[in-house]
Every structure is written in C-alpha cells, then in structure tokens.
C-alpha cells in the first residue's frame, strides 16, 4: 500500500511537471502558481463526482477542462498585454495565492473552507494512475514534436523572428498555458481521488515551487528529463523520512549540487534513448579500462616528476 501511494504520487507529479515543461521549457514562460490549477482540477473533479455522480475518468477530464478554462480567463488578458518573464511569473504567483485564499474563505457545506473535503471515494488505483500518466506523457511527446511544439520553441528562442514567420505569439503562448493547466488539473484529480482528502493547504506555493524545481533538475527543454527527475526526487523525499527534520535540508542540498555540477539538468536538451543506454552498458567495461589506463598513466608521470 505504501509503495502504491508513492507510485501514484510520482504519477501525479510527472503529469504536473510535464505540463509545466511545455509552458516553461518549450515556450519560455515561468510560472510560480501552477498549484492553483491543480487545486481547481482537484476540487472540480471531486465535487462533480460527489454531487452529480460523474464517472471517475470523466470527472478527471472535467477538472482538467475547468483548470484550462480558468487559464484562458487569466492568460488571455495577461498575454494580450505582453506580460512576459518575471512579470508573468509574478502574475501566476498571485493567481495561485488567490485560488488558495478563495478556497480557504468559502466556509460553506460544499467547499468547507480551510477544513477541506474529507470522505472522497478512493477511485484512483495504481493502474489507473499509471495509465493516465502514460497517455498524457505520450500526448505531450507527440505535441512537442509536432508543428505546434516547434512554434512554441520558436517563440521561446526568438519572439520577433517567430512573429515574422507568421507564428501568433498570443495564440501559441495561450495554447501552451491551456495545455499546461489541463495537465495540472488532471493531476489534482488523480491525487484527490487517491488521498481521499483535499484542502487548500495541499496546494500551497511550496507545491508550485517543487514543480519548477523538479523541472529545472530534469532539464527544461526535455520531456524525459522532468519525467526522470519527478521519479527521483519524489521517491528520494520518501526515502529520506528517517532523517525527520533534516530531510528537507538534504533535499535542498541535492538541488544545489545538481545546479552546481549539472546546471542544464539531468537530461539537459536531450531526450532519453534506450538504444544509447544499452550501448553505454555494453561499452562500460571497455570505457572503464580506458579510464583506468589514463589514471595509471597520470600517476606514473607524476611520480617520475
């Protein structure tokens, strides 16, 4: 049960971070408020299932659509007024905070304010979480390799040149934001139906920061990088529970070490290749022999001097 809980959490984090990768890595817009979209998706899916008996998968999709709809309301005027860079990040930070405060202060029987929603049916299973994650990763992989994905990269690299080539900056950025919000909304529903409890505190700014940190650790211009980083960091955070109060300190040091020795992230601008990985392990003994020879030669020359 515990291992299943970790795997489902990993799946939810992968979905969220992959969505953020499209917005930040491929389109070049940093967001510090994606936990707000996750909250909208979680509350939307749970309430639809509770009060209207909407089936599980349809509730997840509906929660994602709600998050995407809100992203249009927030994103269109923001992007229309050409807010970018730090200004867009601050705008999204404010959005995430506003969503959490609204949910906190809605003290009615439906939302239940800061106390959250207990008694949620456990509709998410291990296999359904893995299935949803795989489908969404597959869709994102195809999207970033399509013409729309290339438009996003063009906007991220050089907006003026992209616009001269006929790429609509507002439409491309808005599409990226909408898909990213949809992913976070679905992830919120998956997590809510697994944990059987959601509250505004579950979607704090810390969660948004964790998404961004995971993305940077994996590599912003990659899909497999954030995928691997979400697995590594989520499982490591669980594994370090025995450290109690020192757990987050070690977790933070890991981020610092990655940024120091691998600033471009785990995968950087590359994608994971099974063929290259197999080739690496096949050539591993030979490469280690070459490395050993270099070290021996280095120490022998140093001793002679």
Image: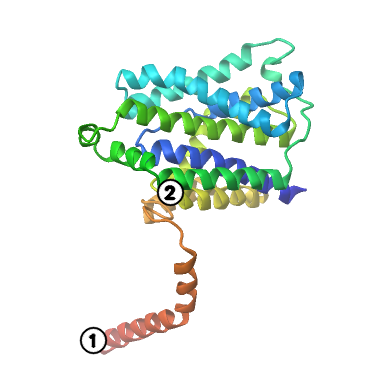
The quarter of the image holding the C terminus is bottom left
Answer with the quarter of the image where residue 14 lies: top right
Residue 194 percent location from the top left of the image: 72, 37
The one nearer the camera, 51 or 229, is: 51
In percent of the image, x 46 and y 62: which residue is there?
273
How packed mark 2 is, by other alpha carbons closer than 10 Å (few <14, some 14-19, many 20 or more), is some
Query: 107 left or right of 295?
Result: right
Q: Is residue 204 visible?
A: no
Residue 176 percent location from the top left of the image: 42, 33
Q: Is residue 128 visible?
A: yes
Answer with the quarter of the image where residue 203 lies: top right
SS class, disc 2:
helix
| Between discs 1 and 2, the one toward the N terminus | 2
CA gap, disc 1 and disc 2: 38 Å
SS class, disc 1:
loop
**Badge 2 is on which residue?**
256
The one nearer the camera, 28 or 108, is: 28
Residue 97 percent location from the top left of the image: 51, 21
Whether 286 is drawn above or below 111: the answer is below
**Badge 1 is on which residue?**
305
Whether 143 is drawn above or below 115: the answer is below
In percent of the image, x 52 and y 28: which residue is there?
205
How packed mark 1 is, by other alpha carbons closer than 10 Å (few <14, some 14-19, many 20 or more), is few
Q: Mark 1 or mark 2: which is in front?
A: 2
């Amino acid at each position: 049960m515990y291992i299943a809980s970790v795997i489902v959490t990993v799946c939810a984090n992968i979905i969220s971070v992959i969505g953020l990768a499209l917005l930040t890595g491929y389109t070049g817009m940093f967001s510090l408020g994606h936990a707000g979209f996750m909250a909208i998706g979680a509350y939307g899916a749970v309430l639809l299932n509770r009060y209207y008996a909407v089936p599980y998968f349809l509730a997840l999709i509906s929660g994602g659509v709600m998050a995407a709809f809100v992203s249009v309301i927030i994103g269109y005027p923001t992007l229309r007024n050409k807010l970018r860079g730090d200004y867009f990040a601050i705008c999204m930070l404010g959005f995430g905070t506003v969503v959490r405060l609204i949910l906190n202060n809605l003290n009615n029987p439906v939302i239940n304010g800061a106390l959250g929603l207990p008694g949620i049916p456990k509709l998410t299973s291990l296999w359904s979480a893995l299935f949803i994650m795989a489908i969404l990763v597959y869709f994102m992989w195809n999207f970033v390799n399509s013409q729309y994905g290339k438009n996003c990269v063009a906007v991220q690299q050089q907006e003026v040149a992209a616009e001269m080539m006929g790429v609509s900056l507002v439409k491309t950025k808005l599409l990226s934001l909408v898909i990213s919000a949809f992913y976070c909304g679905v992830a919120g529903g998956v997590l809510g139906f697994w944990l059987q409890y959601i509250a505004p505190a579950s979607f704090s700014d810390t969660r948004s920061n964790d998404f961004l940190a995971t993305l940077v650790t994996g590599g912003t211009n990659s899909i497999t990088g954030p995928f691997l980083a979400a697995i590594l960091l989520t499982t490591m955070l669980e594994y370090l529970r025995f450290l109690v109060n020192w757990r987050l300190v070690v977790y933070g040091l890991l981020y610092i070490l990655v940024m120091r020795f691998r600033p471009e992230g785990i995968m950087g601008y590359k994608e994971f290749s099974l063929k290259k990985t197999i080739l690496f392990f096949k050539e591993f003994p030979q490469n280690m022999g070459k490395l050993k020879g270099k070290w021996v030669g280095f120490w022998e020359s140093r001793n002679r001097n």
